[in-house]
Amino acid sequence: MGRRAVDTRKYNKIGTRRMFGRILIVFFLIIIGTMILVGRILFLNKDKGNAYEKRVLSQQSYRSNEINYKRGDITDRNGNKLAISRKVYDLVLDPVLILTKNTKGEEDFVEPTAAALKKVFGISEEKFRKIINKNSGIQYYVMQKYKGLSKDKVKKFRELAEKNKKIKGVTFDERYERYYPYETAASKVIGFCSKENIGIWGIENQYNEQLSGENGRRYGYFDSNLELVETVKEAVNGNSVVSTIDVNVQGILERHMREFQERVGSLNMGCIIMNPQNGEIYAMSSYPEYDLNNPWELSVVYSDKEIKKMEDEEKSVALNQIWRNFCISDAFEPGSTYKPVTVAACLDEGVTNPKRGYVCDGFQQVAEHKIKCTGFSKGGHGTINICQSLMESCNDVMMQLGADLGGAKFLNYNKDFGFGQKTGIDLPGEAAGGVFTKDTLHSVELATSSFGQGQTVTMIQLAAAFSAVINGGNYYEPHVVKEITSESGALISSKDNALVRKVITESTSDKIRNYLYKTVEEGTANPAAVPGYEIGGKTGTAEKHPTGRGNYLLSFAGFTPVEHPKVMIYVVVDEPHVKDQAHSIYATEFSSKVMKEILPLLGIYQSDDIKKKDKTKATDIKIPSTREVPKGGFSDEEYKVAISN
């Protein structure tokens, strides 16, 4: 038994030795195999490493980047380009490709590429090498100081690359920059774009969706020869907007506004020129205009010294004030330019007629208030008709008309003429103004509102309402865009019919036009006359609150021809920089100068023999009461007698 046990241990030792030997052999075989593999890799890397690197690179996606769409143009009514998108190029480097070595381990692309970049763009070789070495693992590096390159520069570089195939790793991303050929023209109407191609203010903002398109995409990779192969999904460009603006009329208007500001100056100034027959706006400006190609420039209003003192928040507020469109965003008491609305409403309701006489003794006693007339210093206007009340801008008669019309009907007409609500003009930032309601319109408020005080309006509201008064009684929605077209020129939408409602009869409108013509020919608006043209219109001189400071807002609303108005102009001069502000001549003379120049451009010409619609002078119209108003005005008893007559 003992011998068998010894034999077993012997055999176990032999088995263990054999197993260890086998493991050792396998280990050595693995070591040898690994050494052979490493040697082979080192050999391949030394001999053909660059070729394999190219093969791997060719199998990788070069990049996928967006192709920017072209934003649609904005043109004036005659096709002149007001806003366009110019194609520009951004220089992009691919350091990985540029640093690729050949089979000998040499850099074939660095020197030729560096030389080409220096020749065309003036980039030094030292700067170029520093960039590619620092970004050696990057395939897309935008040269920030070489963005917005011209087509000519890019073409020149591409010609060099075509001749020398060793110029590699340089591409140009295409994009569009917004450009405004007329710079400041209609800046408050057109608006501008952000760097992200999003419209800010004006038409650019209001019609941003229509002007915008859809980006495309470019997919690219290298073939085995390191030539770039691309697949492109084209961008969809935006639609174009045809505005109602006439850039020539706009230019004349802005020149006269600039000259007025240099000669007189004012706190604010605005002007709207439009077609009263359809609501199309030919020109709109509020001073000062700004450069649309550099909208962030504050120097149009502020000095360098003032700008340096501003904090960022102050600069932001100042810029928004510069961009603000006074013609649609600011509300004020209109003064006497509102009076044609009051007279039109009363004629339409039959509460007055052209032959009825009214006595102005210089004031009206309304409730506990004695409200003066503009003619108070002369003892009142005496006995006058409604035509003369407009000619002489008589507040007294307007208060009498307002009382006869009544609060309810006054509010209805006020609403129908668009006051107290937005007109719907296709521009951002429109204000609604403030009017009285059924609960707040008492006798005093009715009296003051009848001659344009108490309630507030915007310029565009007054312009639209005045147009309805003179065009036959049709209220049109004012607008600055005529139509939208595709890139190919196909019509997408148009604003052919902007009629909103009928507010007064044609008969009433005919009478008002004639009264306003006489107001220019014989009345307070005479400085607005233009030789060779029939001009109608109404002045406004509104004292600003708080009263007693001598601050006035002056205005004039005019039109021509009288028979069938084709052009309406509304001018507002807010606080002219003069000692005595209460003179509407600043607005009427301005209107005359502008109209004289723009009318021929709009196809309205002078006539040596103007056919007057009604040559009868307002003072020739017989009215029931011819009693003279005594110096100092009537007593209460005398006033009652005069009214009864």
Image (tube, rainbow, N blue to C red):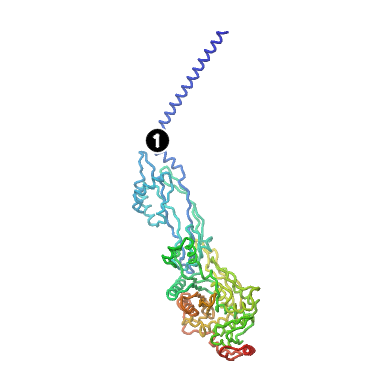
In this rendered view, identify the residue nearer to me: 278 or 284. Answer: 284
Quarter that holds the C terminus:
bottom right
Give coordinates of residue 515: x percent, y percent: 55, 83
Task: Report whether 26 appears left or right of 367.
Answer: left
In this rendered view, identify the residue nearer to me: 146 or 572. Answer: 572
Q: Residues within 10 Å of mark 1 (few under 14, many from 20)?
A: some
Give coordinates of residue 27: x percent, y percent: 46, 24
Quarter that holds the N terminus:
top right
Give coordinates of residue 272: x percent, y percent: 51, 73
Query: Quick check: 518 above or below 263?
Result: below
Q: Where, by quadrant of the figure, is residue 466 drawn?
A: bottom right
Query: Quick check: 8 above or below 640?
Result: above
In this rendered view, identify the residue nearer to me: 282 or 158. Answer: 282
Secondary element at image label 1: helix
In this rendered view, identify the residue nearer to me: 55 or 553. Answer: 553
Residue located 46% across and 43% down the image: 60
Question: Is any atom of residue 293 visible in this view?
Answer: no
Give coordinates of residue 607: x percent, y percent: 47, 82
Total numbered labels placed on residues in the image = 1
From this viewpoint, which residue is outermost toward the bottom? 627
Q: Where, by quadrant of the figure, is residue 149 drawn?
A: bottom left
Question: Is any atom of residue 544 visible in this view?
Answer: yes
Q: Where, by quadrant of the figure, is residue 638 drawn?
A: bottom right
Question: Identity of the amino acid at label 1?
Answer: Asn
Query: Quick check: 21 above or below 518?
Result: above
Query: Quick check: 45 above or below 88?
Result: above
Report which residue position mark 1 lands on.
Answer: 45
